[in-house]
Every structure is written in structure tokens, then in C-alpha cells.
Amino acid sequence: MLRPPLLLPLALAACTPAPNHLGNPLLLPVSALTTGAQNAAYNARRAEVKAVLAGTGPAVLHDANAQARLWRVAPVPVAERKDVLRDIADLPDPGSAEWIEAATVTVMVRL
């Protein structure tokens, strides 16, 4: 068993600025907090996008008001919006739960 005085040098040796797969172990708590906050923000936006797509259904492909609601919730770059709508139009079984989930993913990957 390692004695406590030996643990400190080993822990400090792990705090190298060189690239490694874990990063600085002293920053892991901060990384955990920021990752949690980022995940919460992503999940909230994803839920909003899914709600808009569930509410509008396939009408989002043709209705300008439905598209405007979608773009307010999911600010996809203007240059990519036609591609997003084309990809959504190519999805099978419009309006189904699977379609809503796939359309949500299609929008979210463009953000």
C-alpha cells in the first residue's frame, strides 16, 4: 500500500500539460460541471425542436409559419435550411413517432 506522502508526488505528476486521455485531474470536477450544463442546454433545445416538429408534423416542409417556428427554436444557418428540409422530406412515414425522432436528429446535427 502506498503511504500518503508518496501519493502527493504521484498526483502532481498526473497534472502534466502534455496531451493525455484524461486531462488534468484537478480540472475533472470543473469539466463535470460544464459538461452537465452543456448537456442540460442541449437536451432543452432538443426537446423544443421535437415539440415543434411534433406539433407541425409534415407541414413544416411547406408551411412558412411552421418553418419560422422551427428556425426560431433551432437556429440552423440559412445556407443549410434547404438541405435540412430536403433531408426531412426524404424520411419515411411522415408524422409518425419515428419520423419525429429522425427529423429531430436531422435538425440537431446541423446546429
Image: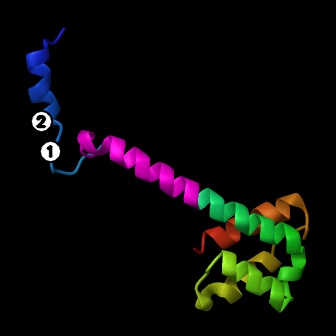
Residue at 12%, 26% (x, y): give it.
8
Q: Residue furthest top?
A: 1
Give the labeled residue for mark 1: 16
For disc 2, the marked residue is 13
The mark total stands at 2
In this picture, is 77 found above or below 8? below
| Residue 86 visible in image | no
Q: Position of residue 78 (x, y in %)?
A: 61, 90
Magenta stretch, main secondary structure class? helix
Q: Nearer the viewer, residue 37 or 96?
A: 37
From the image, which quarter does the N terminus lie in?
top left
Q: Is residue 69 above or below residue 9?
A: below
Q: Residue at coordinates 17% horizontally, 31% vertically from top-left?
A: 11
- Is label 2 in a helix, a strand or a loop? helix
Q: Residue at x 71, y 60 (%)?
A: 47
Three-letter code, disc 2: Ala
Badge 1: few (under 14), some or many (20 or more) residues near its Cα, within 10 Å? few
Q: Residue 35 in magenta?
A: yes
Name the residue: 15% across, 50% down.
17
Locate residue 54, reporting x and y percent. 85, 67
Name the mark on residue 1.
none
Residue 110, image x and y in percent? 60, 75
Find the magenta span and give its range: 23-41
What colour scheme governs how the chains and residues are painted in the rendered image of this protein?
rainbow
Residue type, numbered disc 1:
Thr
The reply, left or right, for residue 76 in relation to residue 13 is right
Instruction: Evaluate whether residue 20 shows in this view.
Output: yes
Left or right of 85, for residue 30: left
3D distance between C-alphas at marks 2 and 1 = 6 Å
Instruction: Check contact, mark 2 vs mark 1: CB within 8 A.
Output: yes
When asked about the image quadrant of residue 12, the answer is: top left
